[in-house]
Amino acid sequence: MTMYNESSATIPSLIAGTNYSFIIIPIDTIGREGPPSSLIQYIWNVPAQVVNISWDQISSDSMTIWWNINEDTTSHYPPVHYIVSVHNITINTTDTNVTINGLYPNNEYTVYIKPVNAIGEGPLINITVNITERKTTSTNVDLHDVSVTEERSSDAITTSGNNRLMTTSVSLTIFVSVTSSSVEPSTTPSSSGSMNSSLLFSIFGSIGAILITCIIAIIVILVCIMYKRKHKSKYEYIVHISCIINIL
């Protein structure tokens, strides 16, 4: 039994893992003892090993690891913090999870977790993890979302003359860019529209030829009239017209 004159006491030299029981008895100034307190049991021990460890790789060089506290507080004092170590990395944390950076892909690592309290370090536990290289996911681009821009860097020129043929080559640069909206399909003119256009060109060409012929005929008549006025005979006039018509 130890006597204390204060309302608190420090008990040294306790042994880890030992179960201690305490009773507090008040004593007055003349040495009379009062009723004792209820039995106080205290386990002087390091924290228990952590449980339920899980992990997840979040990038090619980092991972996050989680664990839970052992709820058996009847034989162990709860941890105050944790020491997490892997390779040459050591992290002290008060949380039950930690993110570890600076790892190398395509390697296997052993992660150690140790709980710590005021008494000392608890039992160590480890888990083996595999860090893989995360590949960039390629995105397939829909053809309807692609616009193509043609940049002509030079023109094509073909020249013929005097039995010579000169050709300048054409180089094209194609730029492909993805747009947020779909490219509307272009409308191709129908074959009937092309036939109608060709028919119109033929009609206008025929009318033009007729007009040119009429103009030439009028000019010929005027020339003949003028020629007649120059005292040509009627026979020569008719022969001249016939020659002109044959030429046409």
Image (cartoon, rainbow, N blue to C red):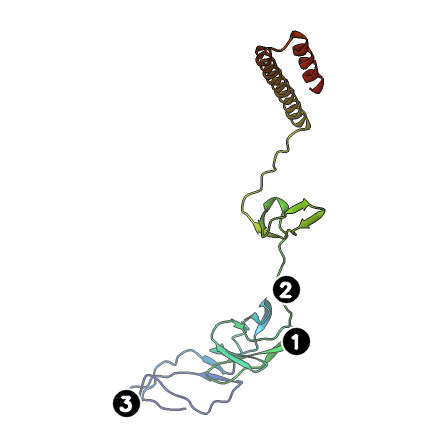
Q: Secondary structure at mark 3?
A: loop
Provide the residue designation for mark 3. Answer: 30
| Location of residue 67 by image quarter | bottom right
Q: Are marks 2 and 3 in contact (CB under 8 Å)?
A: no
Residue 49 vertical placement versus 205 (above, below): below
Residue 233 x, y percent position in the rendering: 64, 9
Residue 184 x, y percent position in the rendering: 58, 38
Quick one: label 2, few (<14), some, or many (20+) residues within 10 Å?
A: few
Number of marks in the image? 3
Q: How far apart are labels 2 and 3 at the CA level?
A: 83 Å
Residue 104 x, y percent position in the rendering: 61, 75
Quick one: label 3, few (<14), some, or many (20+) residues within 10 Å?
A: few
On the picture, is 184 further left or further right than 27?
right
Residue lying farthest to the top in this orientation: 234
Looking at the picture, tell me which residue is in the foreground, 82 or 158.
158
Residue in the picture at 54% in, 43% down: 181
Q: In terms of sequence position, does the residue under pointer 3 or pointer 1 come before the other?
A: 3
Q: Nearer the viewer, mark 3 or mark 1?
A: 1
| Location of residue 32 by image quarter | bottom left
Q: Secondary structure at mark 2?
A: loop
Q: In terms of sequence position, does the residue under pointer 2 or pointer 1 come before the other?
A: 1
Looking at the picture, tell me which residue is in the foreground, 77 or 116.
116
- The amino acid type of the residue labelled 3 equals Ile
Q: Nearer the viewer, mark 2 or mark 1?
A: 2
- The amino acid type of the residue labelled 2 equals Lys
Residue 83 vertical placement versus 154 (above, below): below
Q: Are marks 2 and 1 in contact (CB under 8 Å)?
A: no
Provide the residue designation for mark 2. Answer: 135
Looking at the picture, tell me which residue is in the foreground, 63 or 93.
63
Q: How far apart are labels 2 and 1 at the CA level?
A: 18 Å
Provide the residue designation for mark 1. Answer: 108
